[in-house]
Image (cartoon, grey):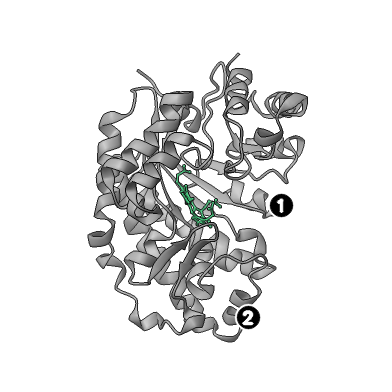
Amino acid sequence: MTKKFLSVLNGNVEKTPPIWLMRQAGRYLPEYRETRKRAGGFLELCYNSDLSTEVTLQPIRRFNFDAAILFADILLIPHALGMNLWFETGEGPRLHGILDGFKIKDLKPPDEIHDTLDPIYQTVRNLSIDLPETTALIGFAGAPWTVATYMVFGKGSKDHKEVKKYLNENTEKFDQLIDIIKIATIEYLSSQIVAGAEVVKIFDSWAGSLSGTDILKYSYEPIYQISCELKKRHPSVPVIAFPRGVGGGYEMFSKIETISCLALDQSVPSTWAQKLQENVVIQGNMDPLLLVTGGEKLETEVIDILGNLASKPFVFNLGHGITPDADVNNVDKLIELIRK
Ligand code: CP3
């Protein structure tokens, strides 16, 4: 049985494009909320291989997406490197970060992350057995810049002003941090592949906060280097990159030969994205809000994206994660529109 998602990542056009959604396992699903409660908390859920396997499978059972994404979080790497990590209900992640006094020299060596991350590899092994034979399995990690923003500031931020101030005033230390995350990320993704991940995705969710040459140094370069090393170790495994919010900068990312697929956020018009398809497979990029509001606009946007992008190898997805207030009926409708 061939997997449509893998076929398209290898450059083929299928009758209808494959579809999966960022954050497809999450709070918009009642069965996810129930399992999370059973686990006791979000981190407990991530490190419980049986329950993580279960929540990864939930959206597949309900919607039969063409790909499943491992249930975990990009902040497990800082946690495995020795930083305190916790999730404040309703507020998101918190780390005891560098601006709060954590010292980079106190991070564990990147090759010591596996003890902590072993349950994640077990989840991948479980999934490679439990998934339907037409569903591809995606592993993932955060890109060094996005992970570093949390490691420095200790939580999310709108414009990353404090992180950029830290990097301008402590460039050498910040570069050392990026290097540590980069090496740990290569090890982490490589281990996910060995455990059974068929594709890996690198999330640079905050790439759009960078400016000027820093986009090259802190988003483009680390993603490029990670993808090169993964290609060397696992030549047949496609790498998806998601440098969110880089606008015209997507063009240079589309030319990285070790990246099979470029994920676009919803700020990019699909007519503009067409030219990137000469270089790379495109994934994206419907506004997640349309799964909250639904209606005619959902339909016209889907038709527009498909009309502009689906005649070349293309993966349908959102421009960012599905939100907790998304309506599952709209997800059903979306899938029907894509597959009919
Ligand atoms: O279904 C999937 O996509 C797989 C699992 C997944 C999660 N996080 C689960 C999660 C993936 C791929 C991520 C990636 C992630 N985590 C990113 C990059 C993608 C993006 O959305 O930009 C980032 C920046 C993080 C860090 C993070 N984790 C934040 C900022 C938050 C809080 C915001 C929020 O949505 O609540 C989390 C928590 C988180 N990660 C949840 C889930 C399902 C919600 C936690 C809960 O159940 O309360």
Q: Nearer the viewer, residue 88 or 221?
A: 88
Q: Residue at x 64, y 52 (%)?
A: 252
Dot 1 corresponds to which residue? 247
Mark 1 Cα-neighbour bin, 10 Å: few <14, some 14–19, many ≥20: some
Q: Are marks 1 and 2 in contact (CB under 8 Å)?
A: no
Would you say 115 lies left or right of 227 here?
left
Residue 107 showing in the rendered view: yes
Q: Residue at x 66, y 59 (%)?
A: 208
Label at residue 262: none
Q: Residue at x 73, y 36 (%)?
A: 270
Mark 2 Cα-neighbour bin, 10 Å: few <14, some 14–19, many ≥20: few
Residue 182 location (% of width, % of height): 42, 64
Residue 258 location (% of width, % of height): 47, 47
Does the numbered disc 2 mark a residue whose Cβ is under 8 Å from ligand 1? no
Q: Nearer the viewer, residue 125 or 88?
A: 88
Residue type pointed to by label 1 = Gly
Residue 165 location (% of width, % of height): 63, 80
**Is the residue 226 above or below the residue 68 in the image?**
below
Residue 254 location (% of width, % of height): 60, 46
